[in-house]
């Protein structure tokens, strides 16, 4: 069990909260004693992650090392390209499992531009976003527990060119029937999310899903 209600997910959620409180405190506080307390909170959050994920403490600290300013969720985009009842998936080198092409939104990127870029980098195809089908809080869906608080944006996209070619983070590109998906990289996408994206493809008038 690794869904949002499991003990591991709850403990990682507490660590995220501690980290956010500490990061916000360090952003706004100038009192040296308060800053010392907030720094200690960050260390405690990293210790919790180190213990729960069974990783070295320095690696746990590095997860949030570059985080500055007011703490907010990260934004991940995923694009659904369909050919009839088949969906484009890419296989991740990191875990050997399949996912919708996508990734982090960069600073100064519009989400629609980010998803088009990620599709091209990971699959070789060129595409454009035609509809935001869903904006979901990853913590509210049965993804494996993770360190970051992430909002996931799912776009229905249409093909504009290109040809299949894996990227630096992917090693295979293929279309699969929506009802017969391969083993998915569930930290990135879930089967029901792909099926719902296909419903939006078939019925563009559906309202955008959220949360």
Image (spheres, rainbow, N blue to C red):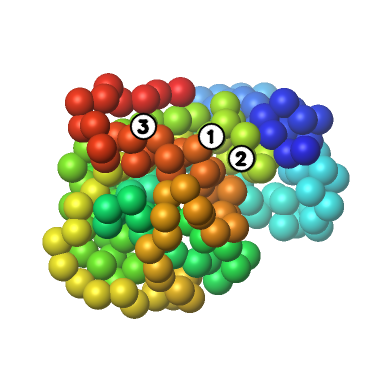
Residue 26: x and y in percent read: 57, 32
Residue 85: x and y in percent read: 33, 51
Which residue is at the front of the view, 132 or 149?
132
Image quadrant holding the N terminus, namely top right
Disc 1 to disc 3, how far (Cα)? 12 Å
Please indicate whether residue 132 sits to the left or right of residue 96 in the image.
left
Disc 2 to disc 1, how far (Cα)? 7 Å
**Which residue is disc 2 drawn over?**
143
Disc 3 crowd, CA 10 A, few/some/many (<14, 14-19, 20+): many
Please indicate whether residue 129 sits to the left or right of residue 91 in the image.
left
- Does 179 appear above or below 1? below
Which residue is at the front of the view, 37 or 33?
37
Residue 95: x and y in percent read: 62, 65
> Can see residue 103?
no
Q: In which image quadrant can residue 9 be found?
A: top right
Foreground mark, 1 or 3, reads: 3
**Which residue is disc 3 drawn over?**
134
**Which residue is disc 1 drawn over?**
138
Residue 67: x and y in percent read: 53, 44
Label 3 sits on a secondary structure element that is strand
Confirm or deny contact between disc 2 and disc 1 (CB under 8 A).
yes
Residue at 73% in and 39% down:
2
């Amino acid at each position: 069990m690794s869904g949002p209600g499991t003990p591991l997910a709850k403990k990682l959620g507490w660590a995220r909260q501690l980290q956010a409180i500490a990061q916000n405190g360090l952003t706004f506080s100038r009192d040296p004693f308060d800053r010392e307390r907030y720094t200690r909170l960050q260390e405690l959050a990293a210790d919790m992650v180190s213990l729960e994920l069974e990783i070295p403490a320095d690696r746990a600290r590095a997860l949030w090392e570059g985080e500055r300013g007011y703490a907010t969720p990260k934004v991940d985009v995923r694009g659904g390209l369909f050919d009839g009842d088949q969906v484009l998936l890419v296989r991740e080198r990191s875990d050997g499992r399949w996912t919708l092409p996508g990734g982090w939104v960069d600073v100064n990127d519009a989400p629609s531009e980010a998803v088009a870029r990620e599709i091209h980098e990971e699959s070789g195809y060129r595409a454009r976003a035609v509809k935001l089908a869903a904006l979901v809080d990853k913590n509210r869906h049965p993804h494996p527990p993770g360190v970051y608080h992430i909002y996931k944006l799912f776009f229905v996209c249409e093909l504009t060119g290109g040809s299949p070619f894996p990227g630096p983070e992917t090693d295979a590109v293929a279309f699969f029937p929506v009802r017969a998906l391969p083993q998915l990289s569930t930290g990135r996408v879930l089967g029901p999310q792909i099926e719902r994206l296909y419903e939006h493809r078939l019925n563009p008038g559906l309202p955008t899903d959220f949360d």
